[in-house]
């Protein structure tokens, strides 16, 4: 069983969370939207597929680079989405 962390690369505030606990995610789908400290809106994607086992942030939370946003139990097979 392999777990991956979704990490914030930005300083900012979580504007939107498009995933929930126990939801299934696919490679490169949007997971979080962060309003950065310089006013830009950045979408967080991850190159993994699997099941979300925990969300560590909610909308409105402040984040910093390196902060864990969620943990995902990765699939052992390759999948994709358009």
Image: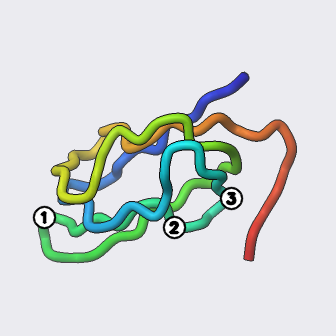
Residue 15: numbered disc: none
Q: Position of residue 6 (x, y in %)?
A: 47, 44
Residue 30: numbered disc: 2
Q: Position of residue 17 (x, y in %)?
A: 39, 61
Q: Position of residue 80 (x, y in %)?
A: 78, 63
x 61%, y 29%: residue? 3
Discs 1/3, front? 3
x 57%, y 34%: residue? 4
x 58%, y 43%: residue? 22
Task: Provide the secondary structure element on which disc 2 rests.
Answer: loop
Task: Provide the secondary structure element on which disc 3 rests.
Answer: loop
The C terminus sits in image quarter: bottom right
Residue that numbered label 1 is attached to = 37
Residue 26: numbered disc: 3
Discs 1/2, front? 2
Q: Earlier in the sequence, mark 1 or mark 3?
A: 3
Q: Earlier in the sequence, mark 1 or mark 2?
A: 2
Q: Dot 1, crowdedness within 10 Å: few (<14), some or many (≥20)? A: some
Task: Provide the secondary structure element on which disc 1 rests.
Answer: loop
Label 2 to label 3, Cα distance in Å? 9 Å
Q: Position of residue 26 (x, y in %)?
A: 68, 58
Q: Residue furthest top?
A: 1
């Amino acid at each position: 069983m392999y777990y991956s962390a979704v990490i914030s690369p930005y300083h900012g505030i979580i504007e939107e969370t498009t995933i929930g606990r126990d939801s299934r995610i696919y490679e490169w789908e949007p997971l979080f939207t962060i309003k950065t400290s310089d006013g830009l809106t950045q979408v967080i994607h991850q190159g993994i597929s699997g099941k979300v086992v925990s969300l560590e942030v909610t909308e409105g939370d402040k984040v910093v680079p390196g902060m864990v946003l969620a943990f995902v139990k990765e699939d052992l097979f390759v999948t994709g989405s358009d």
